Image (cartoon, grey):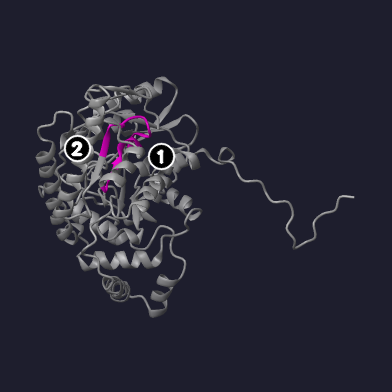
Amino acid sequence: MDTEPPLGRPGTAMPPLDRTDLHPSVDDPVLTSMTTLNDIAGRFPDALSFAAGRPYEAFYDAESLPRWLRRFQRHLEQDQHRTPAEINRTLFQYGRTKGFIHHLIARQLEQDEHITVDPEAVLVTTGCQEAMVLALRALRRGPQDVVLAALPAYVGFLGAARLVDLPVHGVREDADGIDPDDLVTRVRLLRARGLRPRACYIVPDFANPSGATLPEERRRRLLEIADREDLLLLEDNPYAFFGADGDRRPTLKSLDRSRRVLHFGSFAKTAFAGSRVGYVVADQPMSDGTLLADELAKLKSMLTLNTSTVSQAVIGGYLLEHGCSLVRATERERAVYRRNLTAVLDGLEQRFGDDPTVTWTTPRGGMFTVLTVPFTADEETLEHSARAFGVLWTPMHHFYGGRGGHQQLRLSFSVLDPDRIATGLDRLAALVAERKEKLRAQGGAGSTPVRVRGALTRTPGIGALEETARMTA
């Protein structure tokens, strides 16, 4: 007779789970790209890294954290007249879903970006990544909904879209950023196919990974297109404070008169990444008189409930210490990134200036440049680079959703100094020389277009995908 196993004793072991039974995103190359790169970096800890897009670390000081926390406590006591019990509750209890430093963020936006916004339109999030997920989740009403982005695009945005089953369609990018004419073409082609383009993701200043910056005229044109084509623009601008020329260009949101722009923000690159504090300005009016920020807050309440109260307090103190100006707060970092950008661009010119098969972007700020090479720059090549030459970088195909950039690599120079940059470029030059010699031995010229997965990857140049109709991430 069959009997049930006694309570408290193990029965038949559950068979291993199969990824095909889980959401497709768990096995998506876009979502696994960071773990793959971290695994390679972890196996070669002595390799010099151009891979991680982390902020500069030398100015970090653990003593700053309690100082910023005390500064925010004084703000609660002296400016908001909170009692000790109320201050303790603010810091130790569950917090307001929309956050409690929204008024300071609004003050910073007005001072630095000339964005005047109701603090209630600011939703404080657990990093900018959560802000993206919330916005994309809200925009996906049905299977016909899609978004657009210039390719190459930030992997975090492509991954967020995958999580909520929102397809991303590519728009051509040139040296001045996203191409407005191609955006219009793509929107109309998508509508002709019965799809509903909801929004376009844009990094206007020193984009990750390309480093491209939109001229002001193109920014204004994008806003006109958004009005005419009934689109939202998802503006993500974490590198805007790190221009090498010192000039600040107006954000899309500061030029927005029709509330077409959702503005994402983060303190990862300005204050410190460990805070995991970001935000979205969502001042679009709803038909019932509320704001889109209120709708996004409903989603957040079921995802993270509220952003860490302690992290918010520390970032609040950081803002208050610098008069709510990130321009003022990031003076030292801006100088470092300017120095490093010069070192990278000069170093590339010294090592590859006479080589027509190697080209690179020349950004005017930010943390990244992209190198185009005459060989496949994938994980296999990266592992060989780390093992044989002691240098790490990021394969660009991740930023195309696996559909382009196979002969490109991203160099991040944010955490290095000029000496380490020079050493790393020497090692990279040795890798390039070895790969080119291997190509010559195989009889390959290494400079002609290479057909890869239905896309045309060319050297030189950053705009790798000609067949943009196939660029669905």
Q: Is residue 103 left or right of residue 113?
A: right
Image quarter hosting the C terminus? top left
Instruction: Residue at the far front: name it.
Output: 441
Q: CA distance from mark 1 to mark 2?
A: 26 Å
The residue sitting at the bottom extreme is 84
**165 and 383: which is toward the camera:** 383
Answer whether residue 178 is visible to the viewer in this image: no
Q: Residues within 10 Å of mark 2 (few under 14, many from 20)?
A: many
User: Does residue 289 lie above or below 230 as drawn?
Assistant: below
Q: Amino acid at mark 1?
A: Val
- In reply to whether residue 381 is colored magenta, the answer given is no
Mark 1 vs mark 2: which is more N-terminal? Answer: 1
Q: Nearer the viewer, mark 1 or mark 2?
A: 1
Q: Quadrant of residue 56?
A: bottom left
> Start and end of the magenta stretch?
390-409
Q: Residue at x 23, y 26 (%)?
A: 440
Q: Amino acid at mark 2?
A: Leu
